[in-house]
Image (cartoon, helix red, strand yellow):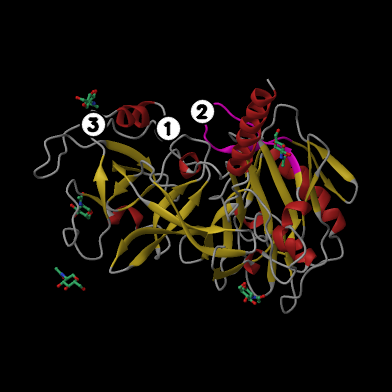
Amino acid sequence: MFLLIQLVLTVLVFISQEHKAISAYVPPYTSVVAPVNKHTDAAMPLYSVQIMTSYTNMQYNRANFLIDIDAPFIWHDCILQWNIHPGSCPNNTLCTYPVSCEEYQCTDVRTTYSYKNPSCPPVTNSSTLPGWGYCTCPVNVVNPITRLCDQALLNYDDFTMNTCDGRNALNGYYGANPNAACANSSSFGSFPSSVTGVMAFSSSPYSLLAYLYQPLKKSLALCFPSTTSTPGVVFVGSGPYYFLPQSNVDIKSLLSYTPLLKHPDSFGYFIGVNSIVIKQRSIEIPMNAITKLSTIEPYTTLRSDIYNRVIWLFSIYAVGIPRARPVAPFGLCFRTFRQIVLKVPDIDLVMSNGNKWTISTANSMKQVTKDVACLAFIDGGVTTEHAIVIGTLQFEDNFLEFDLENMTFGFSNSLLRRQTSCANFNFTLTNSP
Ligand SMILES: *[C@@H]1O[C@H](CO)[C@@H](O)[C@H](O)[C@H]1NC(C)=O
Ligand SMILES: *[C@@H]1O[C@H](CO)[C@@H](O)[C@H](O)[C@H]1NC(C)=O
Ligand SMILES: *[C@@H]1O[C@H](CO)[C@@H](O)[C@H](O)[C@H]1NC(C)=O
Ligand SMILES: *[C@@H]1O[C@H](CO)[C@@H](O)[C@H](O)[C@H]1NC(C)=O
Ligand SMILES: *[C@@H]1O[C@H](CO)[C@@H](O)[C@H](O)[C@H]1NC(C)=O
């Protein structure tokens, strides 16, 4: 009997140790990381993420993808090849494997996760590839800059990012194999010159986020740079996040949260803003109004009723600053002398739970010429689809976290007030332990 108990105990101890050994494995990374570049050579400022797309001649090739938190799926400049072998892909071209029109993903993307634009022509199955016995899967894409329709072919793609411990990019790689789509090079004519694709960071099951698995948390952190000279950063996964020169401040600890809302017919992200406050005076936002976040729109757009009240209140507190004639698309502009930063009030977006996203001068004023700066909020008209659309100027040097597991949106307010910026992540590769 004693022996039996001893045996059972031994087995139990063994099992529990085994269990401990398994649960004790902690990967050396908490996220994957990639640089974010600002581009000013297109019709509006745009931001791209740099991803490793293929491996040739012993090194990774990189491509810049426009960051789009609305896009249903990823698409970029590539071609389809069904039998890719070394040397078969034309030089300066990215080759990927085709999805056939008979595969499940083809119907799924075309019916449920397509771009919703009634002006796109219906897709047909006619195209094929030399030597491949199936039809390819054409899908419609909508150019986020021109809003025009285009066609692309669904593929099996292969993307790689560096792993990250929150302090440095690590020497380890993380691969993802999304179904993306290949479009013709000519489709990217309106894009910044070094950008050749659209990265879907939306809540769609064909967004890149859907293809990143354990141990990575389904959470996207964006930190857009304010200049073209030094990149900002995107993380997918969980914190911590450290920016130079502060090696002891986890940016995650600076975040305020508000629930992330879903909106029918959109893969994008929405939040509830209850009021806009300037110097303790509050503009109530109608209950049914929803606020959308956009990584494409350059400035925050307000429905006319809200816009007029914001402009009125802002001008009261900016009464001492000489006005300049408005420069389109802005409605309220000021004279600046040698680009000295204007003393204008902060604009607080007060969330449904009371947390405040403070928009400070760097994010509210746009220097349009040497002598003129404008309030970077624009009038969206009387009947806009969304009462408020927060645009990219308001994102710059703010750390933003879209947590799809908890459905929360985290925001840091301007990092400049914390003596750091989105351009301060240390990308120096470090060996993963
Ligand atoms: C493609 O590049 C390789 C290596 O740089 C070169 O040897 C080859 O001639 C190139 N082919 C064409 C068609 O330009
Ligand atoms: C394309 O072909 C597939 C498989 O034969 C079929 O299920 C699908 O309905 C076709 N789609 C179109 C748009 O013709
Ligand atoms: C790509 O676009 C160019 C220019 O519009 C056109 O000549 C070419 O046929 C297109 N290629 C494909 C594969 O559609
Ligand atoms: C997210 O949810 C998990 C589990 O409910 C919780 O442990 C964690 O603290 C939450 N994180 C945030 C940032 O709210
Ligand atoms: C960036 O990280 C590397 C590797 O950990 C470190 O050697 C370097 O000092 C860091 N850069 C700065 C400016 O702290």
Three-letter amino acid code at disc 3? Cys
Question: Tag 3: Cα neighbours inside 10 Å, few (<14), some, or many (≥20)?
Answer: many
Q: Is mark 3 within 8 Å of ligand 2?
A: yes
Assign the magenta stretch its main secondary structure: loop
| Residue tagged 1 | 116
The structure residue drawn at horizontal position 39% and vertical position 33%, both measured from the top left corner, is 114
**Label 3, on which residue?**
101
Say if mark 1 contacts mark 2, CB within 8 Å.
yes
**Res 382 visible:** no
Sequence order check: which comes first, mark 1 or mark 2?
A: 1
Residue 411 seen anywhere in this rendered image of the structure: yes
Q: Considering the numbered disc 1 on the image, is that residue within a helix, a strand or a loop?
A: loop
Q: Position of residue 280 (x, y in %)?
A: 91, 47
Residue in view at x 25 percent, y 45 percent:
97
* Nearer to the camera, 128 or 103: 103
Counting other residues with Cα less than 10 Å from the Cα at mark 1, is it few (<14), some (14-19), or many (20 or more)?
Answer: some
Mark 3 residue element:
loop
Label 3 vs label 2, nearer the camera? 3
Q: Is residue 78 magenta?
A: no
Q: CA distance from mark 1 to mark 2?
A: 8 Å
The residue indicated by pointer 2 is: 265
Ligand 4 visible in quadrant: top right
Image location of residue 46, percent across then percent down: 51, 58
Is 281 rendered above or below residue 133? below
Q: Which residues are magenta?
A: 257-272
